[in-house]
Amino acid sequence: MINHALQFLLNSVLSFFLLALLLRFYLQLFRLPFGNPVGRFLIALTDFAVRPARRVIPAFRKMDMATLVLAWGVSFVLLLTLSLLSPRGAMIFGRGFVFLSIAWLATVYLLRLSVYILMVAVVIQAVFSWVNPYHPLAPLLNGLTRPFLRPLQKRIPPIANVDLSPLILLIACQVALIVLVGWLESLAPRLF
């Protein structure tokens, strides 16, 4: 019983921090401003870890690799502690190469969370476009989704002035989660 509560708490706290790190990485990757409330919140929440990491981990092609490596590290620690707290935790760590397997799964977990971030951004952007297109977060959401929606909008014309590209993108994301991410997860036991 206590194990489940501890797993829940660790999963909640570390997943929230991991989400904040990934969002910060994507805002920087797409060159989006941090002057909005979400950006300021992400900086306030993650700066204590990102600033020292930047001294050690350099940027790569204008990408903030320190934030991405921290996100991967948090993902690794989360999966490792959840594995240790599971009922079969001792049995799992009796096998060889378990750390490589967890490292692989941490990478896949980042990929899965990135797809979920995109899906949520598309849904919220669609709702804002109907309810309040001038919401202060609309430019942020547009910046996150534009690289993925723009190619679809060029190929798929609106039907009766309704843009179906967000729907197509959501379907593509769901297929990616089922096929690609599922396949990558299934490789972990076989690779290591």
Image (cartoon, helix red, strand yellow):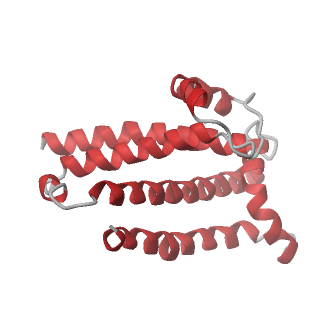
Q: Nearer the viewer, residue 89 or 123?
A: 89
Relative to 51, is 135 on the left or the right? right
Q: Nearer the viewer, residue 100 or 138?
A: 100
Work out whether 20 lies above or below 47: below
Relative to 45, is 25 on the left or the right? right
- Say which residue appears at 74% left-offset and 62% top-offset: 148
For the question of whether residue 166 can be seen, the reply is yes
- Say which residue appears at 22% left-offset and 61% top-offset: 96
- Say which residue appears at 32% left-offset and 67% top-offset: 192
Residue 86 location (% of width, % of height): 18, 52
Residue 16 location (% of width, % of height): 46, 39
Q: How many discs appear?
A: 0
Work out whether 19 lies above or below 156: above
Relative to 40, is 180 on the left or the right? left
Q: Quadrant of the N terminus?
A: top left
Work out whether 121 lies above or below 52: below
Residue 50 location (% of width, % of height): 56, 29
For the question of whether residue 159 can be seen, the reply is no
Q: Quadrant of residue 170?
A: bottom right
Q: Quadrant of residue 65?
A: top right
Q: Nearer the viewer, residue 42 or 69?
A: 69
Work out whether 66 lies above or below 107: above
Residue 130 location (% of width, % of height): 75, 54
- Say which residue appears at 50% left-offset and 77% top-offset: 179
